[in-house]
Image (cartoon, grey):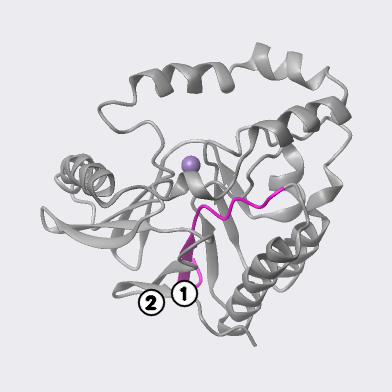
């Protein structure tokens, strides 16, 4: 894997093209350009989209700028690894065959430069997520997806548009965030105990690196309020915040 390795998550690309959304995408694309310049690797740790549903022969056109950008990364020889999040369940072969190097629909483990990585989007790992874990099993159910695919795309996307309310619900109270973080540490501790140096997660819209059991828990933040990313240079992993927008 080409160094440096960049990790981002929770971009939640929206179905609308408001000015604000365009700016956010521009920022993302400048970040992608930076990756091309440094000749690294991009790892998307889930929730690239707020909603994405691909059909056997049809792809949603609203994401054309993204397709173009990912395709240019690919053509520049940049590997893009995409670990899907709870908003990205409904991708088909287009994403993997045409736009990325590889798609992972579950947690994955890697060794890079002698360090062991455990990667997960992170949804469903909290002790009180029981109801959500059940919902997840339905959302990823083949029959459900097959049925949804038979709804006309115009209606399918109208439903998605109505459900997806991006923004404010990612901002939680400090108390809630603390509680989540301590649960994540417990989760990361058991993984570090198996010799992992880094447990990398997204989903929680918090940006922090915590020491756990000789390893590190990296919570990646998001591309909504933090514009944060992890960068691994072969030796250390740092959490940074994208500022340059030139
Ligand atoms: Mn998520």
Instruction: Tell me the element at label 2.
Output: loop
Left or right, residue 93 beside residue 192: right
Q: Position of residue 88 (x, y in %)?
A: 61, 39
The residue where tag 2 is placed is 233
Q: Which mark is residue 209?
A: none
Of helix, strand and loop, which mostly describes the magenta segment?
Answer: loop
For the C terminus, the quadrant is bottom right
Does 117 sit above or below residue 189?
Answer: below
Residue drawn 44% across the image and 74% down it: 241
Residue drawn 74% across the image and 47% down it: 15
Range of magenta residues: 1-14
Left or right, residue 109 beside residue 224: left
Relative to the observer, which residue lies in front, 40 or 137? 137
Left or right, residue 35 beside residue 161: left
**Mark 1 nearby-residue class (10 Å; few <14, some 14–19, many ≥20):** some
The residue where tag 1 is placed is 3
Does 191 sit above or below residue 233?
Answer: above
Q: Is residue 219 magenta?
A: no
Instruction: Tell me the element at label 1.
Output: loop
């Amino acid at each position: 894997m080409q160094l440096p390795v960049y990790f981002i998550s929770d971009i939640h690309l929206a179905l609308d093209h408001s000015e604000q959304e365009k700016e956010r995408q521009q920022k993302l694309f400048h970040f992608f350009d930076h990756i091309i310049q440094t000749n690294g690797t991009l790892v998307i740790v889930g929730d690239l989209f707020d909603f994405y549903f691909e059909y056997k022969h049809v792809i949603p056109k609203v994401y054309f700028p993204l397709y173009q950008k990912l395709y240019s990364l690919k053509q520049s020889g940049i590997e893009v690894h995409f670990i899907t999040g709870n908003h990205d369940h409904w991708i088909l072969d287009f994403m993997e065959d045409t736009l990325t190097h590889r798609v992972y629909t579950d947690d994955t483990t890697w060794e890079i430069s002698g360090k062991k990585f455990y990667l997960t989007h992170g949804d469903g790992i909290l002790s009180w997520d029981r109801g959500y874990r059940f919902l997840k099993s339905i959302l990823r159910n083949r029959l459900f997806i097959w049925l949804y695919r038979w709804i006309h795309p115009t209606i399918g996307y109208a439903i998605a548009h109505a459900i997806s309310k991006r923004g404010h619900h990612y901002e939680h109270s400090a108390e809630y965030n603390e509680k989540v973080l301590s649960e994540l540490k417990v989760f990361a501790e058991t993984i570090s105990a198996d010799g992992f140096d880094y447990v990398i997660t997204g989903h929680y819209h918090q940006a922090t690196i915590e020491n756990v059991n000789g390893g590190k828990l990296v919570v990646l933040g998001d591309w909504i309020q933090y514009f944060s990313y992890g960068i691994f240079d072969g030796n250390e992993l740092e959490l940074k915040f994208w500022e340059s927008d030139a």
